[in-house]
Image (cartoon, helix red, strand yellow):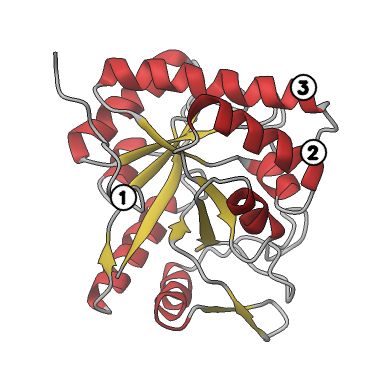
Amino acid sequence: MSIDLNSDLGEHFGAWTLGDDAAMLEIVTSANVACGFHAGDPRSILETLRGAVERGVAVGAHVAYPDLVGFGRRPMDVSDAELEADVIYQIGALQALARVAGTEVSYVKPHGALYNTIARDERQAAAVIRAIRAVDSGLPLVCLAGSPLVEWAEAAGLRAVPEAFADRAYEPNGALVSRREAGAVIHDPEQVAERMVRLAREGVIEARDGTEVAVPAASICVHGDSPGAVEIAATVRTALLDAGEELAPFTVGRQMHRSES
């Protein structure tokens, strides 16, 4: 049985570069590509998509609240109709760029505040689910492992892909520690790798209070914008392979690349 390793990419904007997409694409099996709402401009998004094609990396739509200034990490109380339309718009934009690059959008992963909100807010979750179903009901939705969103998505007929975060600290209830708190992000590559090997083998992560949290994850996220992100991702990949784990996109079975016409 394999596990997926994903990262948030395509987040450069104009003259500002965020992360090292080329290096991360050599490490991960899936790329959550920004759609322009929290980060990413059309040219840099297209370059990232082409890089994913060259390396055989699966592509997902990293949809977000319309919040460039806050990098999509500020919660928003948007209407159902607005959120649904925003998500449809973002998936559609990335689908067009992906088609030009020679690949396709094979899943959806919400970003930042939207990701955390719909993990437990049934109203906003329903709007995102409707948007995905309206575009393509075959698109899997990446969800916080152990959150109610997993059941809501599956009840609506979507494939839910439970996800763990390699470099994030966990609360005892399985939620992520808020980025506003000290220790929310783990920066030691060896510590991160050790945690992920245990996750892959035992399905548990140690919470910040020392208790064990069950995290039945099919995909592991390593953030591309964190300090030392490439080293962390590479260390996690090596540790998993050394532990005998197979790395592969969870989208295996969907067509990842279209043939050239």
The residue depicted at 56 percent of the width and 72 percent of the height is 215
Q: Which mark is residue 261?
A: none
> In the figure, residue 47 lies in which quadrant?
top left
State yes or no: discs 2 and 3 in contact (Cβ < 8 Å).
no
User: Which residue is labeled 3 in the image?
Assistant: 81
User: Which residue is labeled 2 in the image?
Assistant: 75
Mark 2: amino acid: Pro
Q: Position of residue 171 (x, y in %)?
A: 72, 71
Q: Earlier in the sequence, mark 2 or mark 3?
A: 2
Mark 3: amino acid: Ala
Q: Position of residue 49 (x, y in %)?
A: 33, 27
- Circle 2 or circle 3, nearest the eye: 3
Q: Is residue 44 visible?
A: no
Please tell me whether mark 3 sits on a helix, a strand or a loop: helix
- Give the Cα separation between the discs numbered 1 and 2: 29 Å
State yes or no: discs 1 and 3 in contact (Cβ < 8 Å).
no
Q: Is residue 125 above or below residue 87?
A: below
Mark 1: amino acid: Thr
Q: Is residue 3 visible?
A: yes
Badge 3: how crowded within 10 Å, few (<14), some, or many (20+)? few
> In the figure, residue 201 lies in which quadrant?
bottom left
Q: Earlier in the sequence, mark 1 or mark 3?
A: 1
User: Which residue is labeled 1 in the image?
Assistant: 29
The residue depicted at 14 percent of the width and 13 percent of the height is 261
The residue depicted at 52 percent of the width and 49 percent of the height is 226
Looking at the image, residue 68 sits to the left or right of residue 34; the answer is right
- Give the Cα separation between the discs numbered 1 and 3: 33 Å
